[in-house]
Image: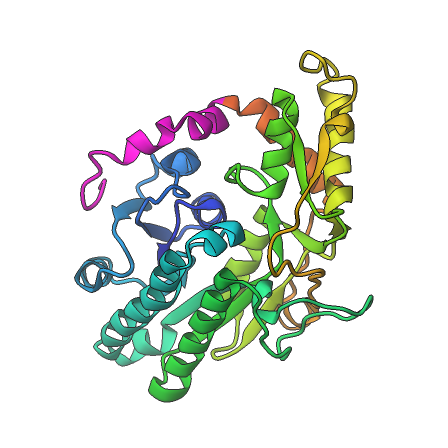
Amino acid sequence: MKVLLTGGAGFIGSALCRYIIQATQDSVVVLDKLTYAGNLKSLAPVAASDRYHFVQADICNAPAVQQVLNEFQPDVVMHLAAESHVDRSIDGPAAFIQTNIVGTYTLLDACRAYWLQLDTEKKQAFRFHHISTDEVYGDLHGTYDLFTETTPYEPSSPYSASKASSDHLVRAWHRTFGLPVLVTNCSNNYGPYHFPEKLIPLMILNALAGKPLPVYGKGEQIRDWLYVEDHARALYTVVTQGAVGQTYNIGGHNEKKNIDVVRSICALLEELVPEKPAGVKQYSDLISYVTDRPGHDFRYAIDASKIERELGWTPEESFDTGLRKTVQWYLQNKGWWQAVLNGSYQLERLGQGMTNK
């Protein structure tokens, strides 16, 4: 199978690319604009494979997208390219509207034109898999309520509103034009190669540097945490086995308060890195509470029973095992995150042509 993977240099996209190259015989072409969140070092473990190709392009650039489709002739498109940081969407919504909405439209339009000219067998086999978030549902107020595939959309931030819009576009292209689509909505991901602006890597790296660990409000917000490599397996399962037109929610069955996540990180660092920065007695002493962000959703939790029942997928990692693996990875891969923090990782995109192979 040939997979066109948009946003494949990002956190989830790179995990999916590594999984496909390392665990299957499929080929992957990564199409990525290489914004700040795109990191070619995250693809280094598979970059030498002759089944991996990279193209630097913007999904909003219709001719470039069409060229990749025509040249690579993918069997499936897995669409992960998106602006994804809530705080950034509050500070500057325009990029989220452009990439997440206009970009998804551009990609859908190009894929529809490509799909229509395929022969009958390839047309029937083609899939457009749109990867989205549980944030489109808004938040849950009840203690036991869960997001299901039919939960009404009620996005709270510019980010989640832009992702909700892209979800609607994908379903409309299926309903109106017959494009064979799949949609997945996932809970909060964590794991190796996670950009340091996100909660878990930010707390790990700040603690190692003896910097404050900023927690919004009282840290009572609840999230369902999904180990990124479990998510990659789920995405591949959906694109190869999922029913056309269906939505599958993907969750980790790990609801945790933000403050408890931070305390768990501190406890692991006490065990794994007992020699602390100067002036730090305990890592937990670095926890500081900051003003909550506007429109902050209180609780997310996913009902992932459909994907388990219909496709047989369940997460392999508990939060404790996944978090330990994550902390250990950051301790063992200082070169990766130091290059992110000092900005040198972005130098790799200079000189990138249309493709590296």
Comparing 233 with 50, the one in front is 233
- Prevailing SS of the magenta stretch: helix
For residue 176, side relative to residue 157 (left or right): left
Comparing 36 with 181, the one in front is 36
Residue 317 place in picture, x, y as percent: 70, 47
- Is residue 240 visible in this depiction of the protein? no
If the image is split into quadrants, where does the N terminus sit?
bottom left
For residue 274, side relative to residue 119 (left or right): right
- Is residue 49 visible in this depiction of the protein? yes
Q: Residue at x 77, y 36 (%)?
A: 263
Asked whether residue 342 is drawn in magenta, I would say yes
Comparing 94 with 129, the one in front is 94
Residue 107 place in picture, x, y as percent: 30, 67
Q: Residue at x 53, y 66 (%)?
A: 238
If the image is split into quadrants, where does the C terminus sit?
top left
Name the residue at the front extreme: 291
Name the residue at the right extreme: 143
Q: Residue at x 38, y 29 (%)?
A: 343
Q: Residue at x 45, y 66 (%)?
A: 162
Range covered by the magenta-colored residues: 335-357
Q: Above or below — where is 266 with respect to 190?
A: above
Comparing 65 with 124, the one in front is 65
- Which corner quadrant of the image does residue 185 belong to? bottom right
Q: Give the colour scheme shown.
A: rainbow
